[in-house]
Image (cartoon, rainbow, N blue to C red):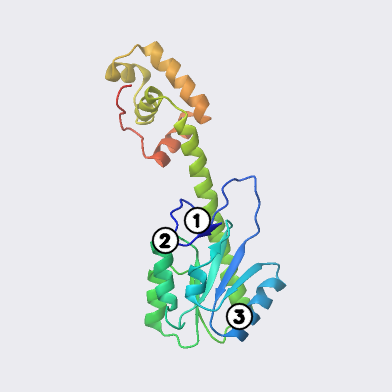
Amino acid sequence: MTTIGETAQSPNCISTAEVIVEPMVYVVDDDRLMREMLSSLFRSVGLRVRLFESAKELLQSELEDAPSCLVLDVRLPRLNGFDLQAELAKSNIRIPIIFLTGHGDVSMSVRAMKAGAVDFLTKPFREQEMLDAVTAALERDQKRCSEERSHSDLQGRFALLSERERQIMALVTGGLMNKQVAGKIGIAQQTVKIHRGKLVRKMRAKSLADLVLMAEDLGIRGREKEKS
């Protein structure tokens, strides 16, 4: 679990693909009846829910390591919904937000969406409208979590490479042939082949094209590494 304000690479994503955690919907609304209604609605379709009366209460809480979304009332006492959105962004908590208000206008909606909200609903809303918005938000967060886990795994494999293997990976994925790589870094072509074979196995690349995609994701394609 992660307390808001801590530094973390993936504050609300599970750390391993093997662990399956059910999604979580957070609700922040100072209206008790609205909180209870939303809780009942989400639980009726099998979603887990956590309720908060204020933005401060959420900020002082721990978020579960699971794909999630936030249903957030705009008009809250002291710290309003937009303020909370900004605080979450500063803490690198990239949770999809669905804003909810009884006094919305176009400018508020535009402000919310520009800051990254996934939807902006006005009260009263249709239950299906809310469920559709939450479903879309959770799918978006699940995709982000999956991408972050994949990138983290890729970085782990890259960390196992020697400096020479990293250097050769960058040059090979930049379009150079083994002979060109050998001439560029001053080693024998056969040595390049040996290092290339090792790095391909360590990175678990199925083809050169696969290795190129990995290099692009890591930001090293074509960038020559210093000699070890």
Q: Which residue is drawn at 50% across and 56% down?
A: 11
Tell me the quadrant of the picture where the N terminus can be found. bottom right
What's the distance in space between the residues labelled 2 and 3, CA to CA?
25 Å
**In which quadrant will I find the C terminus?**
top left
Q: Which amino acid does label 1 sit on?
A: Pro
Q: In this view, does 205 lie above or below 85?
A: above
Q: Do the residues under discs 1 and 3 have CB atoms within 8 angstroms?
A: no
Three-letter amino acid code of the residue under disc 3:
Arg
Asked if the residue at tag 1 contacts the one at tag 2, i.e. Cβ–Cβ closer than 8 Å, the answer is yes
* Mark drawn on residue 176: none
Q: Gap in Å between the C-alphas at discs 1 and 3?
A: 24 Å
Quarter assignment of residue 42: bottom right
- Rendering coords of residue 76 (x, y %): 47, 82
Residue 134: percent from left, percent from top: 58, 69
Marked residue nearer the N-terminal end (2 or 1): 1
Residue 195, above or below 107: above
The residue at the point 40 percent across, 82 percent down is 106
- Judging depth in this view, the residue of 181 and 76 nearest the camera is 76
Q: Is mark 3 on a helix, strand or loop?
A: helix
Residue for badge 1: 11
- Per the image, label 1 sits on a secondary structure element best described as loop
Which residue ends up furthest to the front in the rendered image?
A: 60
Question: Label for residue 35?
Answer: 3
Disc 1 residue crowd, few under 14, some 14–19, many 20+, Cα 10 Å: many
Residue that mark 2 sits on: 91
* Residue drawn where x is 50% and y is 68% of the image: 60
Residue 96: percent from left, percent from top: 50, 65
First reached walking from the N terminus: tag 1 or tag 3: 1
Q: Do we see residue 80 in this rendering?
A: yes
